[in-house]
Image (cartoon, rainbow, N blue to C red):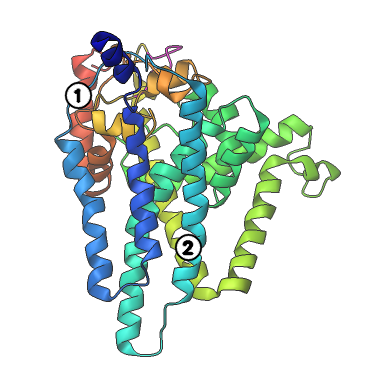
Amino acid sequence: MAIEQSSWLKRRKPSPHLLCLVIPLYALCFLATGPHSAGIASLWVIPVWLTVIVDLCSPQVRTPAENRFRPVQFDAILYLLSGLQLVNITLLLIMASQLSWATGTEIFTALCNLFAIKVVIGTSSSFSGIVVAHELIHRAKPHLKTLGRLLLSLECYEHFATEHIRGHHSKAGTKNDPATAYLGENFHTFWRRTVPAQFKSAWYLENQRLEIAPLRIFHKSLLYHRVFQGLMFECGLVVGIFWYFGVTALAAFAIQAYAAVHKLETVNYIEHWGLSQCSDNSGKQLSWDTDSWFTLYTLVGLSRHTDHNQFSNRPYPQLCHRPESPKLPYGYFVMVFLTVFQNKRFQDLAIKELEARGLIK
């Protein structure tokens, strides 16, 4: 009887993927208790930066895919994360609309709150909102794809759904992919190149699908153009926020969206850096992976990116460790920090790994 009970408890042990709820729940607490004084708002930033240290100290994990996979349970995590993102954006607008700019003290307080929004909500919107959207847009069910597009629209980046699925996955790790950073390319150059290039690619892909001539601006098929639909929704969202919540709320919304997209493209940078010049990457769909336990379970399996590239419809708990992929020395949180603030250090580490695997000479 004791053996049966122990076995039952083992089966019912919560999945470590629940760790992905920590960041959006922290953001929820920040927003629900705001606006904050200048000092308190600054303190809320510290735990977010501490995730870099936690990731630095994270153990390595090379376990196989989740062996207790129950689709309903893991999909419930995605629904919960999506709901948290919608609630957080709503609370963000309410909180920001309450900030005042009447006196010097109030201006300083408002600026501290907006800075905290950039760090706390920008991180949550990226590592929870956009990462979840990335998972959803790969699903077969239409309502899950639509939910993913909605989450991307909250960051004014809905075109990513089109470019990523139909552009990036067919060209990842090649010179034709705007989301693949070149060998030796620094992040700031990549950032300036990839954002407009991905939008241009997404627009072109939809023009191809609807058989719209490249130079045609107005066409009846635009009503079915997914990138155009996303743009119209985002424009309506921006106008609605300004109308109902005011200019400060709109500024806060723009700040978190920018921060979220910036982190997304930082992750794109580290996931594919230099692979277009690797001699034997052709057809292998390699990407940079990390074995960080903290990254794997905080970012719903995103760090097993090579397996995702090869099996894009595979749900996140079933993604496998791929020993053939080049490995980042640390998790995504650390590597994002190095990419933005110590880019030369990131490139040196990446080149060392590529040379060790014989991918470059």
Q: Give the range drawn in magenta.
A: 281-287
Q: Tell me where residue 297 appears, x and y as whole percent.
A: 32, 31
Q: Which mark is residue 91?
A: 2
Q: What element carries label 2?
A: helix
Mark positioned earlier in the residue sequence (1 or 2) = 1
Answer yes or no: do the residues labelled 1 and 2 have beta carbons within 8 Å? no
Number of numbered markers = 2
| Res 176 seen here | no
Q: Position of residue 17 (x, y in %)?
A: 35, 30
Q: Is residue 300 visible?
A: yes
- At x 39%, y 63%, the residue is 31
Please identify the quadrant where the C terminus is shown: top left
Q: Quadrant of the N terminus?
A: top left
Task: Estimate how packed mark 2 is, as few (under 14), some (14 to 19) or many (20 or more) residues with alpha carbons within 10 Å.
Answer: some
On the image, numbered disc 1 is attached to which residue? 60
Residue at left 26%, top 59%?
Answer: 45
**Could you say where residue 42 lies in the image, as x and y percent from the top left?**
24, 66
The answer to whether 354 appears left or right of 113 in the picture is: left
Q: Is mark 1 on a helix, strand or loop?
A: loop
Q: How far apart are marks 1 and 2 (CA)?
A: 36 Å
In this rendering, the answer to whether 275 lies above or below 235 is: above
Q: Is most of the magenta stretch helix, strand or loop? A: loop
The tag on residue 322 is none
Amino acid type at mark 1: Gln
Residue at figure coordinates x 53%, y 41% from the top left: 197
Near-viewer residue (34 or 111)? 34
Residue 244 lies, with reference to residue 344, above or below; the image says below
Question: Mark 1 Cα within 10 Å, few/some/many (few <14, many 20+)?
Answer: some
Q: Residue furthest front?
A: 1
Position of 119 with respect to 244 (left or right) is left
